[in-house]
Image: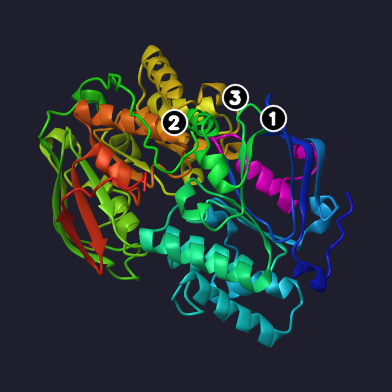
Amino acid sequence: METIQSTTAERGRPAAVTAEGYGWRHAGRKDPAVSDVSFRIEPGERVLLLGASGAGKSTLLHAIAGVLGDDGEGDEAGRLTVDGMHPVQSRGRTGLVLQDPESQVVMARVGDEVAFGAENMALPRDEIWSRVRESLADVGLEVPLDHPTTALSGGQKQRLALASVLAMRPGVLLLDEPTANLDPDGVLEVRDAVVGVLERTGATLIVVEHRVAVWADVVDRVIVLAASGGVLADGPPAEVLNAAGTRERLIEAGVWVPGYTPRLHTSLPTGGGNGSDGGHGTPGADLLRAADLSVARTRRAGPVVNKVSLELAAGEALSVTGPNGAGKSTLALTLAGLLTPAGGRLEAAPELRRGAPGTVHKWKSAELVTRIGTVFQEPEHQFLTHRVIDELEFGPRRVARLPEDEVRRRVDAIAERLRLTKLLQANPFTLSGGEKRRLSVATMLATSPDILVLDEPTFGQDANTWAELVSLLGGLIADGHCVVSVTHDADFTAALGGNVLRVADGTAQLQAPVASGRAA
């Protein structure tokens, strides 16, 4: 299909988006990612797009942005237009902030990254850099223009991706989970920044977000996609989220409705095995000890958190909280043995060591996999194969070298619990953001490590999959495993219990667990 670039004048004008029975099926997938969707969004309208994990929200945003690919990458059904034109012909009128901001960064320095899109629009140099500074201020990313993009935290990269799109002044602003990895203050800051830009430009907004309460008061309309295809609900926020009947349907579908907290399911035994294959630990037994530990992403960068002292024990949970950029992920990766400590001591206790060296960062992958498993903030970083089933089986079969019947038992049970059974033949990279997160967690659960370190484990989850994930992790803790989670999800922290380690201003302090806040 021929691509017709929109003019600079057109780009700044709010656009209408129309879907008529629209659908898309990824190549090699039996079922469509999104199907039979119909609506019309008027120029300047603000829409919150909801639906269960895997309902096709991200796919629909990619379609509107015109970046789904050509006919060889999937099959399109129905009709989708931006101001009457196919989205591919309207590139430049839409600005998309991806669910995974890591995949959107293309330049080495922050200023160049924000300027990239505006430069491609051939704007005058002075206007470009004026927009760069204004957009960075809007999203609250307070770093020098020459700051390396690789040195940003996940939450900071999320702000950077938003600033890059805002600098282009698109007619349609498409946001996919724009606040998912942000601290509570950052969530409101970014939301208010988006609202401020919309008020200045009048742009159309379509935002996908599981934090419904954050956006409900600033949008005109809520559209809910049904997991089986079509639109489950469409109307003003108060009507869709609170009307009797509609509210119950949304809760059943897994939509995060304000005032609703999902019921946790009964935990099932994990059957992790014995100490020789990284299963149950003795409840309360020490597994890992840190004393005056300092951590750094690289030795050249210098420590970001200093003098951390803590003990990780079997059958306990630890939630690591704090503002974006404080060093939470760096600390987690160090505890997991994937980064070398910048100072102090980090030693495995005998119950975790089981013949391996006491210094965890010197362990080989085969020694780590059944002792400490890590779920990265960006799920794609740990995918190794081209099928979900191969991804699940890789650790227990090829690294832990478990018997085939044990591999099958573990993989089947975990896939069922985390709702991955229907996706076993799919390419991991074609999954939705929430599905990718569940798969990344499942790959680590399959090796049944003594300590599981997770970075933002509830990212992209609807209410039903959130409850299943929390219940499963609770079962692990009851079985004697230790779960360490870097998280901004207060309800997740409250549900798992245990200690809270707050990282801020270069220090890490143990605190009492915070109260639940999901239903607020």
Say if the magenta span includes residue 144.
no
Tell me the CA gap for discs 2 and 3.
23 Å
- The amino acid sitting under disc 1 is Pro
Q: Which residue in the structure is indicated by mark 1?
A: 32
**Mark 1 and mark 3 residues within 8 Å of each other at the beta carbon:** no
Residue 367 in picture, x, y percent from top left: 28, 36
Residue visible at 55% across and 50% down in the picture:
99
**N-terminal of the two: label 1 or label 2?**
1
Q: Quadrant of residue 308?
A: bottom left
Say if the magenta span includes residue 53.
yes
- Examine the rendering and report whether any part of residue 168 can be seen: no
Residue 469 in picture, x, y percent from top left: 37, 32
Q: How many marks?
A: 3
**N-terminal of the two: label 2 or label 3?**
3
Residue visible at 49% across and 27% down in the picture:
252
Q: Which residues are magenta?
A: 51-75
Q: Which residue in the structure is indicated by mark 2?
A: 464
- Of helix, strand and loop, which one carries label 3? loop
Tell me the CA gap for discs 1 and 2.
21 Å
Residue visible at 42% across and 58% down in the picture:
182
Q: Which residue in the structure is indicated by mark 3?
A: 425
- The amino acid sitting under disc 3 is Gln
Q: Residue furthest right?
A: 2
Residue 305 in picture, x, y percent from top left: 24, 64
- Of helix, strand and loop, which one carries label 1? loop
**N-terminal of the two: label 1 or label 3?**
1
- The amino acid sitting under disc 2 is Asn
The coloring applied to the image is rainbow
- Examine the rendering and report whether any part of residue 480 can be seen: yes
Residue 293 in picture, x, y percent from top left: 18, 59
